[in-house]
Image (cartoon, grey):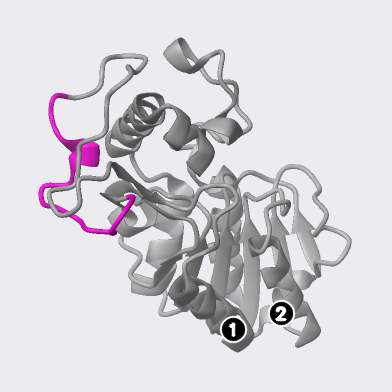
Amino acid sequence: MRLVVLGGAGMSAESGIPTFRDALTGLWARFDAQHLATEAAFRADPALVWGWYRWRAALVAAARPNAAHTGLAAMAAADGQEVRVVTQNVDDLHERAGSRQVVHLHGRLLASRCSGCGARTTPDPILAPPAPADGGAREPPPGCEVCGDAFRPDVVWFGEPLPVDAWAAAEAAVADCELLVVVGTASLVWPAAGLPGIALDLGTPVIEINPARTPLSPHADAHWAMPAGAGVTALRAALARSPCDPRALLA
């Protein structure tokens, strides 16, 4: 079965990675994550924003894939399903769990590039030693050896367009799938929130896995009220019983 999983912050929350709606702690407690994740904030205070992303990158590097990540990888590797992941997260937990077909809509936290010319360098400075202090610290971003501008995280900030190639790959995957499973997302961030509409318009079954109902819930063919890890485990078991009939999962 051609399966696409559209994942959000709830996919990685069980690995201990804070969501953007969680209160910040330590040095960052008086800041709003949605304000820090903007080009305007970076231009106004590069050391503050770079330090925050270095701290977040260290959290991700120390995290481990949870049952949702490993379950999806196992469905592809062991169960013979064709599983493509479209993630709104910027971590690499799907890849570390073993998934091979992953589209990153919002970029990658463990990479950086020049904010001026787009140049990259090795090793990547986002994870360069020394490790950020516990709770984080302000750190001036390194300068680009090509043009002298500051390095920035290789993520999509609020107000920036999605990478063209990633968005095209996501649209094509959803249009081609036999089952779309939406996991751990509040379905509030556009344009990613519009991807299920492609499947629904084509008559493709859509299953939503999320503890709370979302704007997608009234339109999905099924809503499984559970966290990501339990939901993917249940999905894998259901597909083992009906590996070729996506509508059997809706009963």
> Looking at the image, is 176 positioned above or below residue 149?
below
Q: Label 2, secondary structure: give it.
A: helix
- Asked whether 78 falls inside the magenta stretch, the response is no
Residue receiving disc 1: 177
Q: Main secondary structure of the magenta part?
A: loop
Amino acid at circle 1: Cys
Q: Is residue 48 visible?
A: yes
Residue receiving disc 2: 199
Q: Looking at this rendering, what residue extends furthest in the front direction?
A: 147
Residue 223 image offset from top left, x and y in percent: 78, 58
Amino acid at circle 2: Ala
Rounded to the nearest whole Å, what is the CA distance between mark 2 and mark 1? 8 Å
Q: In this picture, which residue range is highlighted in magenta?
A: 115-130
Residue found 50% across the figure and 33% down from its top:
41
Residue 240 image offset from top left, x and y in percent: 53, 72
Q: Is residue 17 visible?
A: no
202 and 158: which is toward the camera = 158
Q: Looking at this rendering, what residue extends furthest in the right direction?
A: 218
